Amino acid sequence: MHRRAFLGAGAACLLAGGPAAGQRSRPPDLHLEGREASWYRRLPDRRVECQLCPRSCQVADQERGGCGVRENRRGTYYTLVHSLPCTVHLDPIEKKPFFHVLPGARALSWATAGCNVECKFCQNWEISQFRPEQVASFPMPPETLARQARQAGAPLLSATYSEPVVFWEYVRDTAQAARGLGVRTTVVSNGYIQEAPLKEVLPHLAAFKVDLKSFRESFYREVLRGELRPVLRAMEIIRAAGVWLEIVVLLIPTLNDSEAEIRDLARWVKGHLGSEVPVHFTRFHPTYRLTNLPPTPVATLERAHAIARAEELAFVYLGNLPGHPAENTLCPGCGEVLIRRAGFAVRENRLRRGACPACARPIPGVWA
Amino acid sequence: MSPRLSRRDLARLAGLAVPGALLARRARAAAGARVGLAPLAEKELTPAAARSALEKALVAATGATSALAALRALLPATETVGIKLNCLAGRGMSPRPELVEALAALLREAGVGRERILVFERSARELRRAGFSPGERENYRCVGIDNDYDPEPSTSGSIGSCFARLVSTTCTALVSFGVVKDHDLAGVSAGAKNWYGVIHNPNKYHDGNCDPYLADLLRHPFLRQKVRLTILDGATAQCHGGPAFRPDATWPLGVVAASTDLLAADAWAWRVMDGERQRRGMPTLAAAGRPPRWLATAQGYGLGVGDPARVEVVRG
């Protein structure tokens, strides 16, 4: 079974008996209705300029932007994926990973097709690198998604898997609907977004995880055809808005794992975002178009951890290494183990009202 | 960078009908960078007129004694022939069914079995919008790719894409059946750009006026080794506003074009579009910021002749 089929089947299992049951399959030949996008401007000759992500695609009539999910129809720009997820799952929030957001909570996680970059190492390329008519999607309006989370006992929603920026209107509307039901919304994104749409939606979000692909512009340009600078700016905006931020860095052997790069990254995080923003270094596994490199050696990850700690980042984690001690949250004040994890499972949570039980140091995060 | 092939790709290519491919290569080499033209007026587009124009264009493009002789050399009866249409712009600016029917009928007469002639486009919906009827036809099968792509991507230079299985696996020979029209980013959308429709992620490859992406796509062995012929329905052409249909930017070019060179028909299309744009007082494609640079890149790869000045036009 291909991953695309697997994800679709997972959604089918989750939704069986739900309001959308029986409407899951979308025949590939069906017309995508779409709805007008929120961030674009019209240009002469029925062309449009997308103002959602920094690519700023200028799109001719009948064409789509680089994300593949936004289409110009006679000078009006449409998002084709609003209310049309291709996968919906209940995940532990640690899977995102968020380690400082309601530990052990479940998040109803959803995605549509499409992405605004093309990482050669994408783990979810079978939905992120396809267009909406090429994957099995099913209608699910924001209100339904929010209600599903509540019914499943999940206090969180998470826009994830592919790239939430390309379904940003759907994220916004879902977060608004969820808030009324007491469900909070998180986003797992590459952070490659323009300032205006980011600022517009941030007030509706509880937490934002940015996949920082590298700390080098050359990597962004060559490996995913994106840019680093707008991502750094987005993280500053998220932090300034008071939305909880965590950063994940997938370390890929020889491409972004040099000591100098990790040190530069850690210094920038400390200087621009603060030392208490959690940074997760995660292990690469060969996939998609990057199959000629081995999995990241554990020693490389541990070295990155040591460098970041030496640069005085308070919360540094290692991921895709189940059982490694660096999955645990330690008190930066006294070294006490506060949250003990094994993979995505929380084995022990000793936090007391968001503080260390031993030295009473407050630990930043969304704890209640 | 040379194209990277998976073992699966190699196995598929090894399975091609080698004698047919060699014969076709010889025929293409003999034709050179030639574009054959035959007159065809939009309002006179009867089945008989379509067939006559197509035959003349094929003879002019190949120098063969007849259209059937040309097709027998290029597309021997052992081949499974995929004819890729460009129907994105709907009825207004897509290959006319009369011409496609004529090509399929000629192929049948040249010895290719009906079940070995596949007329296809990205989706059945697009085919219907352009006036085609997906399903079994008298001389061919008409199908949409829809979601039938290879499960794994295949790499060629900057391109990493899942190819339609029709292209990677089913068909052993390919024909691009396009139109003559402007493209907002690629500059020209004629025979070559049509191949963006056989990969799952063309939206990723429009930066830089599609350069080098389109050239890299054409260099992939699935296309470089299988594409034998380009045919352009130029009864009506469009010099601006593409790839969508823009009636105010069309003009009656009045020809059918054919070429065995992978690039020459596009180079010729660039030339005639610039001519029409200048006649209308519009800037050339280069001056408008969208020169089809990918043609020079593809020519640099040795895929054909992309320089309009080097293309020989032969009128049939």
Image: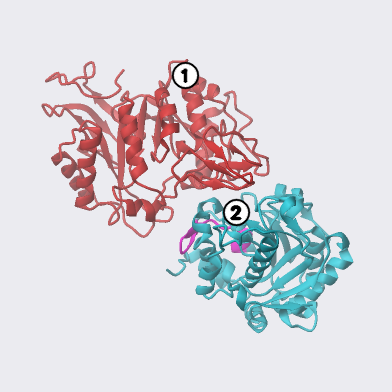
Instruction: Write down the quadrant of residue A182 in the picture.
Output: top left
Residue at 22% across, 20% down = A351
Viewer-closest of A282 and A312: A312
Question: Disc 1 residue type?
Answer: Arg
Give the residues drawn in magenta, as a range: B153-169
- The chain holding disc 2 is B
Residue at 53% across, 42% down = A49
Res. B110 in view? no
- The residue mark sitting in front, 1 or 2, is 2
Secondary structure beneath label 2: loop
Instruction: Write down the quadrant of residue A133 in the picture.
Output: top right
Q: Left or right: A215 with respect to A62?
A: left
Would you call the spot at circle 2 few (<14 residues within 10 Å), some (14-19), or many (20 or more)? Answer: many
Marks 1 and 2 belong to one chain: no
Instruction: Write down the quadrant of residue B176 in the picture.
Output: bottom right
Q: Which chain is cyan?
A: B
Q: Is residue A52 magenta?
A: no
Viewer-closest of B80 and A193: A193
Residue A271 placed where, x, y %?
21, 37
Residue B18 placed where, x, y %?
61, 77
Would you call the spot at circle 1 few (<14 residues within 10 Å), some (14-19), or many (20 or more)? Answer: some
Residue B6 placed where, x, y %?
47, 64
Q: Which residue is mark 1?
A: A150
Q: Left or right: A76 with respect to B103?
A: left
Q: Which colour assignment does the render follow?
A: by chain
Q: Left or right: A217 with respect to B230?
A: left
Numbered tag placed on residue B184 in the rendering: 2
Q: Colour of chain A?
A: red
In this rendering, the answer to whether A178 lies above or below B38 is above
